[in-house]
Amino acid sequence: MALSPVEVARHAQRAGFRGNDLVRAVAHAGAESSFDPNATNNIGAGHTGLWQISGVHLRDHPQWTRAWLKNPANNAVAAYTLFRQSGWQPWLATAGRRLLYMKTAEDAVRQIGETNVDPTTIGGAIDAPDLSGGMLGTAKQAIELAVKAGNWINDPSNWLRVLYVGLGGILVVSALIVVVLPAVQSTAKTATKVATKGIL
């Protein structure tokens, strides 16, 4: 069962995350596991828990086990350890998706009383290391557009609209073939006859 963003923020804070890094950590947990401490992904190296700690890291930290990582407090400790070692590198694959959770994460962090949060950098400079070339705004727009497109596709009424437009197009083309084309052909025949008589 998923935890609330506030519960995840508390685990991350106890593990050592602070300020804007705490906001990002909570957002990454949302992007990685949808705040589900039991989430697992067995593709590739396998990933476990809130921050989807990879099986690759289990080799470097033999005291971490899959069962141990399903405990949210332990997963937060593992995430903070990796963060101290490599920054946000272990979570770069979900950097774009994390942006969707930033506001939720910021609200959760404020609810637990974290005061070292700079709102001017939460949605801006804080994200710059994840995206090359200062393309944060473009990336956010692309993500928002993809989400809107996904929502549009998931709405059955939009498929009916597509069907109506498609059928309408077929009817128009059919009408052109059945009504207009014979009329054009007839006019062309008449014009040919008139032109032929004029020549003779």
Image (tube, rainbow, N blue to C red):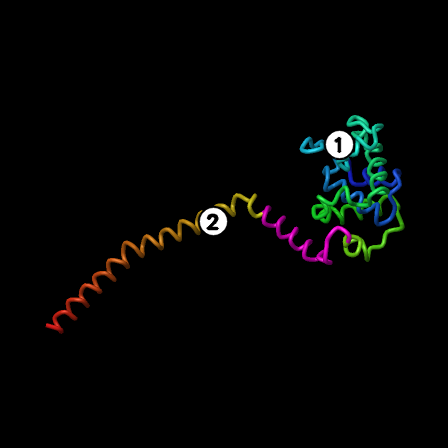
The answer to whether mark 2 and mark 1 are in CB contact below 8 A is no
Q: Position of residue 97 (x, y in %)?
A: 70, 46
Q: What is the distance, in whole Å, between disc 2 and disc 1 at their CAs?
A: 45 Å
Helix, strand, or loop for circle 2?
Answer: helix
Main SS, magenta region, reads: helix
Report crowding for label 2: few under 14, some 14 to 19, many 20 or more residues within 10 A (C-alpha): few
Quadrant of the image occupied by residue 16: top right
Quadrant of the image occupied by residue 181: bottom left
The span picked out in magenta is: 129-151
- Which residue occupies 76% across, 46% down? 104
Marks 2, 1: nearer the viewer: 1
Question: Camera-side residue: 142 or 115?
Answer: 142
Q: Position of residue 77 (x, y in %)?
A: 85, 35
In the picture shown, does residue 43 fall above or below 125?
above
In the image: residue 111, left or right of residue 194: right
Q: Residue furthest top?
A: 67
Helix, strand, or loop for circle 1?
Answer: helix
Report crowding for label 1: few under 14, some 14 to 19, many 20 or more residues within 10 A (C-alpha): some
Residue 101 within the segment the image draws in magenta: no
| Mark 1: amino acid | Gly
In the image: residue 133, left or right of residue 153: right
Quadrant of the image occupied by residue 93: top right
State the residue position of label 2.
162
Q: Where is residue 158 in the image (x, y as percent from the top left)?
A: 52, 47
- Which residue occupies 77% across, 52% down? 127
Numbered label tally: 2
Q: Where is residue 48 in the image (x, y as percent from the top left)?
A: 75, 32
State the residue position of label 1.
55
In what quadrant of the picture does the C terminus appear? Answer: bottom left
Residue 134 within the segment the image draws in magenta: yes
